[in-house]
């Protein structure tokens, strides 16, 4: 055969050999990691952090991908590292050598496997020992050249410019490694040590999560609220769906802030999510917004109704106010408070009517935007989900009623409703928060919940904290002062199931503190 044919056979053999190279395992502080050098045109360094995503660094120009995967963590050692005053300095001394040694071993394996693959392929094809030795040597030399090029072109300063995939793409980083413009070897050592420390902390948190019940058939629900025009929230939802295989998303309102057409175009992104979406309107959401959401193929809008989704029976009602702001002490506040109370009573009556006619399938949870007037739902439903407050809160057995009330913070960091203000004033932005709820599919009762917190407006943080619900659940009992009054709400505020109130009939303060945006606030600069 011709020389080109021998070359093709040798290359194919070398490629097969390289593909068979196992990753090299090493210990980096408390982390067990595998290091793998892979032929690639991407020319980057990738750190894989299952299950939260990947971090990419454009570190060199050679056709080699350096892949490090965190396989596990010694939790006791990680806790010692995080709590020790000298832990990071000790790690800075040892971690670079540990990774470099693993990379060197893997590079050697690549050369040996490439040489063996090329030599074997040529030997089996041409039956010539000399040609197989030449092919093997050439393959080993080519691998060595690629590794040398990687080492020569490696740029430590690239460690300051990471990109992210997976859940981490919605946070700035798992480690705040700064924004330096020049990194020498000492900077690299400190950066690597801090990165390992932050990853260790992340895995400590993950390891401490108690089981939700491995044998239980669970329904996983993501509770979001108060997105307030932040499109990043929909990316967060999509990423959490990828990570946790959601059965349902529940949104308790204030998905927008002013009701402009561009906002309604934004909420149409709900239709791109590959998960069912149940929504109740907040005090900033108008009828047009609810109509856009209801038009999405995966969405349901509840207004004084009960529906069954993902095996759960859910009741919900929209907020009776429009463009209202309960931080305002203007004349509309008291009327808004009374209207919210009336809405809760209306939904409570709807729940009782449903339960009476469906004793085998009672309501599992109710949705209400504003949690401040709870009397109408206490003792009538096991669980209520709400938002509005922009901070998360959990109230078990609220007021001794047997009703658990979970309020989630702002999944959009309250972006268009005051969320930017702290940053402009030199403070920290609001976190992006959501809550993962796990229900027993057989009983519809909440088993556990995970509070998910991500830094807002580019801040550096990802945290998940799990809480198991108590094994014993108190009986539902309507508090003595929470009986439905004879006229819980004025006639003009009564919500016909599925119809809602026209915007002009919803309560509005006389001087809302969140006015319509002017031309400079319209999103066009």
Image: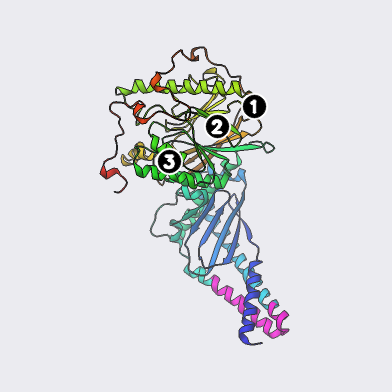
How far apart are labels 1 and 2 at the CA level? 27 Å
Residue at (61%, 19%) from the top-left corner? 475
The spot of residue 1 in percent (x, y) is: 66, 87
Marker disc for residue 85: none
Is-magenta flag for residue 187? Answer: no
Picture residue at 61% right of the left edge, 84% below the top: 4
The residue indicated by pointer 1 is 471
| Tally of numbered tags | 3
Q: Seen in the image, is 309 located left or right of residue 129?
A: left
206 relative to 177, above or below: above
Q: Which residue is mark 2?
A: 307
Q: Quadrant of residue 516?
A: top left
Q: Is residue 127 magenta?
A: yes
* Sequence-wise first label, 2 or 3: 3
In x, y percent, where is residue 322?
36, 30
Furthest residue toward bottom: 2
Locate residue 201, reporting x and y percent: 54, 44
Residue occupied by mark 3:
292
- Say whether disc 1 or disc 2 marks the residue closer to the N-terminus: 2
Q: Nearer the viewer, mark 1 or mark 2?
A: 2
The residue stretch that appears in magenta: 121-147
> Does dot 1 land on a helix, a strand or a loop?
loop
């Amino acid at each position: 055969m011709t020389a080109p044919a021998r070359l093709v056979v040798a290359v194919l053999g070398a490629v097969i050999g390289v593909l068979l190279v196992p990753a090299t395992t090493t210990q980096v502080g408390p982390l067990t990691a595998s290091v793998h050098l892979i032929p690639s045109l991407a020319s980057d360094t990738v750190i894989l952090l299952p299950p939260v995503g990947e971090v990419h660094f454009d570190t060199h120009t050679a056709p080699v991908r350096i892949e490090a995967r965190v396989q596990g963590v010694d939790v006791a050692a990680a806790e010692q590292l995080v709590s020790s005053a000298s832990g990071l300095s000790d790690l800075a001394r040892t971690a670079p050598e540990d990774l470099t040694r693993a990379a060197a071993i893997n590079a050697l394996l690549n050369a040996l496997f490439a040489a063996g693959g090329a030599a074997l392929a040529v030997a089996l094809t041409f039956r010539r020992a000399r040609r197989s030795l030449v092919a093997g040597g050439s393959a080993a030399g080519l691998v060595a050249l690629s590794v040398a090029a990687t080492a020569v072109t490696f740029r430590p300063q690239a460690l300051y410019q990471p990109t992210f995939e997976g859940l981490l793409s919605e946070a700035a980083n798992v480690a705040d490694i700064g924004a330096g413009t020049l990194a020498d070897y000492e900077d690299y050592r400190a950066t690597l040590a801090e990165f390992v420390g932050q990853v260790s902390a992340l895995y400590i948190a993950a390891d401490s999560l108690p089981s939700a019940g491995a044998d239980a058939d669970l329904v996983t629900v993501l509770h979001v609220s108060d997105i307030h025009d932040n499109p990043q929230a929909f990316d967060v939802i999509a990423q959490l769906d990828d990570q946790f295989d959601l059965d349902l998303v529940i949104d308790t309102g204030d998905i927008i802030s002013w009701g402009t057409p561009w906002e309604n175009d934004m909420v149409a992104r709900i239709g791109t999510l590959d998960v069912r979406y149940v929504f109740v309107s907040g005090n900033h959401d108008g009828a047009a917004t609810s109509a856009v959401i209801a038009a999405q193929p995966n969405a349901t809008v509840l207004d004084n109704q009960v529906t069954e989704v993902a095996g759960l029976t859910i009741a919900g009602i929209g907020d009776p106010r429009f463009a209202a702001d309960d931080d305002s002490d203007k004349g509309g506040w008291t009327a808004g408070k009374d209207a919210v109370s009336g809405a809760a009573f209306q939904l409570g009556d709807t729940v009782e009517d449903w339960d009476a006619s469906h004793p085998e399938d009672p309501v599992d949870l109710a949705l209400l935007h504003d949690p401040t007037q709870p009397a109408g739902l206490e003792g009538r439903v096991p669980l209520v989900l709400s938002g509005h407050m922009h901070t998360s809160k959990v109230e078990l057995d609220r007021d001794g009623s047997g009703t658990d009330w979970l309020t989630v913070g702002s999944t959009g960091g309250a972006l268009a409703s005051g969320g930017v203000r702290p940053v402009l004033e030199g403070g920290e932005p609001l976190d992006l928060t959501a809550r993962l709820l796990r229900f027993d599919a057989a009983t519809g009762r909440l088993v556990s919940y995970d509070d998910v917190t991500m830094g807002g407006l580019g801040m550096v943080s990802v945290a998940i904290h799990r809480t198991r619900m108590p094994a014993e659940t108190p009986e539902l009992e309507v508090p003595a002062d929470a009986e439905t009054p004879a006229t819980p709400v004025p006639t003009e505020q009564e919500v016909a199931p599925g119809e809602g109130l026209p915007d002009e009939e919803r309560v509005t303060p006389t001087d809302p503190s969140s006015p319509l945006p002017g031309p400079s606030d319209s999103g066009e600069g």
